Amino acid sequence: MFEEYFGLKEKPFSKTPDPRFLYLSKSHEEALARLQYAVEEREMVLLTGEVGCGKTTLTRALMDELDENYNVALIINPRLSPTQFLRLIAKRFDIDSTSRYREEIIEAIYERIYELNEEGITPVIIIDEAQLIPRRETFEEIRLLTNFQLDHVNLLSIILVAQPDIKRRFKHRVYKPLLQRISLYYHLPPLSEEETKEYILHRLRIAGRKSSLFTDEAIHRIYEYSEGIPRLINSIATNAMLEAIERDKDLIDEECVINASKELEILRL
């Protein structure tokens, strides 16, 4: 529907974390640079940001940039007990271990990580939605993985991606040993109004639209209602496009955005 009506090759505001559509604002560019540094230096990094700000898309972009010298274990649902977590890490690193014992699983993980390093490959563990980890003991297993090191170098990199409320959890003294292992931290803020405009234009260009589709007033309203959160920008823009089609409009104006926002129940009255 969108493609034919607006002259697009594909949908420009999909909610999937497609790295092709990644708009690198100054903050997103800095966040990606820190993730890259953490991977190259085999450090632990914590990336936080509000829901829908682009954290997951950044990790996918990072994974796309990594070559065969990196082996990535991605965990997208970390609601795991300590043993479940270790078993999943083992599975992600292609470790054939059926042991019921934690110590044997850890030993198998260590042997595999050491083998990878001998082959010149850096293991990378990315834990998305880390705020959902239910127990302190699972975080303790994550901390203990950072003990996998040689005299002069760490053996792996760990990336924790979470919502900002994880910082309140980490203030408890029991997490102090884990915090001491986190060498890099970055909070990803929402987009500014100018960045929101550039974000919209960027996604339209990737989708095949060279000319403007949204009026300046429409973009201002999108920023106002989304507060610069990319996922909300996508939702409002998509619904505004549907509104424009219904009203047989070639350009998406302020009225389309207001109506779309009302339908999404995010218009502040």
Image (cartoon, rainbow, N blue to C red):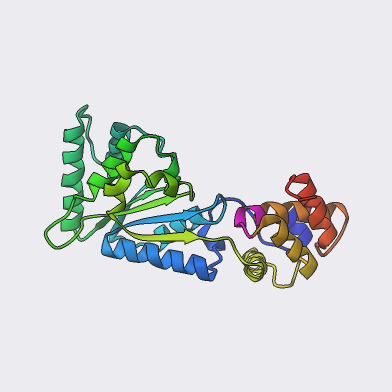
Residue 29: x and y, percent?
Answer: 48, 69
Answer with left or right where residue 111 lies relative to residue 128.
Answer: left
| Residue 10 drawn above or below residue 176 | below
| Vertical placement of residue 207 versus 100, above or below | below
Q: Quadrant of residue 42?
A: bottom left
Q: Nearer the viewer, residue 114 or 226?
A: 226
The residue shown at (79%, 48%) is 262
- The magenta stretch spans residue 6: no
The foreground one among 227 and 90 is: 227
Furthest-left residue in this view: 151
Left or right placement of residue 202 versus residue 268 in this view: left
Tell me which secondary structure the magenta stretch mostly adopts: helix
Task: Please give the name of the residue rendered at 16% of the width and 51% of the height, measured from the top-left corner.
Answer: 114
Q: How many marks?
A: 0
Work out whether 258 lies above or below 89. below
Residue 211 visible, this orientation:
yes
Is 57 on the left or on the right of 15, as rendered?
A: left
Expressed as whole percent of the image width and height from the top left, the position of residue 40 reads: 29, 65
The residue positioned farthest toward the top in the image shown:
100
Magenta region, residue range? 228-233
Question: Is residue 76 shown to the viewer in this render?
Answer: no
Residue at left offset 76%, top offset 66%: 213
Q: Is residue 100 left or right of residue 126?
A: left
| Image position, residue 104 (x, y; %) | 16, 34
Residue 228, picture quadrant: bottom right
Residue 90, how many percent across, how many down? Answer: 27, 40
Q: Nearer the viewer, residue 154 or 183?
A: 183
Say above or below: 261 vs 200: above
